[in-house]
Image (cartoon, rainbow, N blue to C red):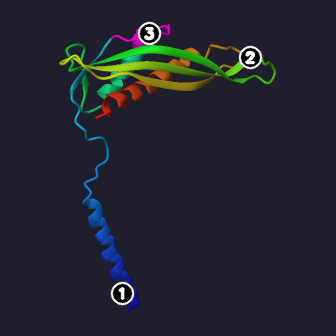
Amino acid sequence: MRKIFTLLFTTILAGTLLCALSACNYSLGNRGKLPFATIEVAPIVNNADIPQAQAMLARDVAEALNGTPRLSTVIENGAAELQIEISGFRRNIAATSSEDSMVASIQNLTLELNCSLLNTRSGKYFFRNRKVSVSTDVYTGAAAGLGEPQSFPVLSREAARKVRDLVVNVW
């Protein structure tokens, strides 16, 4: 008799909990409606003097934005314009060689961006000068600087993801 009561009580409790949770109308993901359906990426300003950084970053940002179902990138006449400035690129020594203290064996590379999103219809900014920063560690061994060209695509893709999140997830 006690087993039946426990089973009945557990079933009623589970059913009540299921009904309460389903009534919350919770859904995964961001369902907010963007105030624009098209976006153009303005030419990227490179104030950090990183060679060929604009083209790679523009491609990665466009790919990241195109991966968003509610948004498409256009070359011109978009409802919003994304303006990106590469404001900084830093190299910091993270570790040195145990045999030679002058050799930096691991460097930390940091890419810094300023992003603004302009409403092209009204001329007002959705947001202005938002900072985005990404970093990665690069093992250079005895040849300092050789890992940098191979690591910039990693920084660019990560920065593009953060810029996409900045554009899409504020709504």
Which mark sits nearer the N-terminus, 2 or 1?
A: 1
Magenta stretch holds residue 46: yes
Quarter location, residue 34 = top left
Q: Nearer the viewer, residue 87 or 72?
A: 87
Left or right of 158 on screen, residue 7: left
Nearer to us of marks 3 and 2 is 3
Q: Residue 20 occupies which quadrant of the picture?
A: bottom left
Task: Please tell me whether residue 159 belongs to the stretch shown in magenta.
Answer: no
Residue ID at (32%, 67%): 17
Query: Residue 105 placed where, x, y %?
Result: 70, 21
**Magenta-highlighted residues:** 43-55
* Mark 2, residue position: 103
Q: Mark 2 is on which residue type?
A: Val
User: In this figure, which residue is indicated by the disc labeled 3?
Assistant: 46
36 left or right of 21 in image: left
> Outermost residue, right direction?
99
| Residue 10 sits above or below residue 168 on the image | below
Amino acid type indicated by mark 1: Ile
Which residue was labeled with disc 1?
Answer: 4
Q: Around disc 1, counting alpha carbons within 10 Å, would you say few (fewer than 14), some (14 to 19), or many (20 or more)?
A: few
Which residue lies at the image location 40% right of the left edge and 12% below the top edge? 55
Amino acid carrying mark 3 in the image: Asn
Q: Secondary structure under badge 2?
A: loop
Residues tagged 2 and 1 counted as in contact (Cβ below 8 A): no
In the image, what residue occupies the spot 68% across and 14% down? Answer: 143
Q: Residues within 10 Å of mark 3 (few under 14, many from 20)?
A: some
